Amino acid sequence: MKTKITTLFLLLCLISPSVLYGQRERGEGLEQIAKKAFDIGDYPKAIEAYSTLIKRTNGIKYYFERGKSYRKAKMNNEALADFNTVISKMNSDASFLQFLSTEYNPYNWRGWIKLEMKDYYGGVYDFTQSINLNNSNNNIIYSCEGRGMCYYNQNMLKEANEDFSKVISLDPNRLNSLRWRASLLFQEEKYSEAINDYLKIIDLEPNGHKIYNDLGVCYIRLKNYQQAYIQYKKASDLAPEVSLYYGNAAMCLAYMNKFDEAYNSINKAIELDSLSYYAYFQKARIFSLNGKRNDAYKNLNRAFSKGLKEPEVFERNLNDFRLIKNDPEFKSLLDRNNIKINLDKTLASDNQQLQKVSTEIVSPKVVSDAQVDVDINIPNNPTKYPYRFALIIGNEDYSSFQRDLNSEVNVEFAERDARIFKEYAVNVFGVPEENIIFMINARSIEMDRAISKINLLSKNTQGKAELIFYYAGHGFPDEITKEPYVIPVDVSAKDLKYAFKLSEIYKELTEFPNQRVTVFLDACFSGGARNQGLLTARGVKVKPKDNMLTGNIVVYTATSEDQSALPYKDKKHGLFTYFLLKKLKESQGNITYKELSDYLKEQVSVKSILVNEKEQQSQTYNSPVVQNSWGDWHVK
């Protein structure tokens, strides 16, 4: 009996690989299993199989295939690491170079990841390298399209136009490039050329209601109100639930002096979306154009009550209010609502500024050239410290990862904070770029891996490591213990078991001997008032406990105790991060930790009252181990 049990155990051991990779018993090899898993969209299984192949062979092809699988699984940081490995090794692997094509071009794949991560400069570099590596038409189409999108988002419209035009010359029906070029031509005020592209798009996608709306805006800019109205009517026929199309059509009718029809159309817009200020604002313009002063004021007040607050909305449409714009009442209304514009300015094109549907593809947002002072001319420290490592996380977009959340819960400017801090980590702190773990909108599993990775770096540098941890995003205090948690973008504050205790993060950072550990927290916790925290504030509301800190660690926080850390909207950063970057820039890194701490405490507390009318006091905490020495530490 004992012999039979032993034999059965040995058989189970022998077939365990077959159990792990189901199809093995049908004679398929691990590579075929991985490929099949990828083809059917089972990316975790493909990743597991390719990881096993890498352990067995360290083959460059498997790094590439795993990178593709990570990319499809939306694990961009892991994909980036694999494509970096491929690029570093491929010139010494003649067999891999034979496989190069659009599909097997690591620069192309890495370029799309960088585009998605908004690293547009890096994207341009990678797509250019992709074209240099493989000049086949198919690869040029994919690479020029990606590079054009990178150029567009840097407001390099000439270069973007050249790339999109190249793609369209090779594939006249390339819908994505037609959309981008149409949007580009619109921005350059080349409306007739944009119309040509929009008409081609409609031929390819006749039910695209957003395109009809954008086409209507082009006709408005050319003062062809009748043709514009026709396009808006088509848009509303295809999507009768969209308020905007009826509002835009109403404005066309008003410009053609068809006011009865205009009122019917704008009332339909309001019926569909009574909470939006824009339809009421359009109705006010229509009444003003029709000489109805009192009705114009009534609807302007309604628009303000619904949330109208952008001065540029008035500046674009000032000519529509020529009936009332010189009234003292009009000026008083703008002043009461903090709308600061030059009322003497009248634009010939005011009545052409109808709202354009903005989508990621049809009308992509362009980053403004009016850059913030701390984002440019960053000092450059040529010295790089090989044992300095940084983990930088910017968690801004929570609503895309959790269906029950709306965009109001997103952490304004957190992504920008992290991206610019990374530049300072490299150029001021002297962290080698390859020593940075950088994450935007990090999920729980990704954050767990990143924290483990920096822990291992600390473990394997024999006490020589200097660690920097920067976090901007949401957090939440445990309702019972009040202990703060850092919240990944895919974790609900109701389920903290997948979040990360600050105390555990500190423990991971200081588990092994280090030269020093520096933490910067510009995070948002939801303690305090229910109408703040996750909805409106960027605030560390739970003071780190003294017993959290051990080892050579200093922690800079955006706030103290239950305060909120708010954004500095004019500077497009968190208030704490802005002044952190400002001091690093002004001092060029020639500053002690104590000097930085004193500066942050003063500037953040004063500016918060001036800008946000709330108290916010930056705090600095240190472990007892460095009580007498941390203040003399230098940034560089």
Image: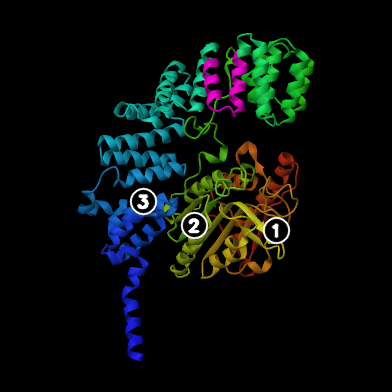
Q: Which element carries disc 2, helix, strand or loop? A: helix
In the image, 7 versus 274, the foreground residue is 7
Q: Indicate left or right for 314 with 238 as reference.
A: right
State how far apart marks 1 and 2 are (Cα).
25 Å
Q: Nearer the viewer, residue 460 or 22?
A: 22
Q: Which residue is mark 3?
A: 68
Residue 245 located within the stretch drawn in magenta: yes
What is the span of residues highlighted in magenta in the rendered image?
Answer: 228-252
Q: Residues within 10 Å of mark 1 (few under 14, many from 20)?
A: many
Tell me which amino acid carries mark 3: Lys
| Residue 62 visible in the picture | yes
Which circle marks residue 446 in the picture? 2
Q: Is residue 344 visible?
A: no
Callout 3–callout 2 Cβ contact below 8 Å: no
Residue 607, how many percent across, how many down? 70, 42
Across and down, in percent, residue 547 comes to 66, 69
Residue occupied by mark 1:
542
Q: Is residue 73 above or below residue 370?
A: below
Label located before the other in sequence (3 or 2): 3
Eyeballing the image, is 446 above or below 141?
below
Q: Position of residue 626 (x, y in %)?
A: 61, 67
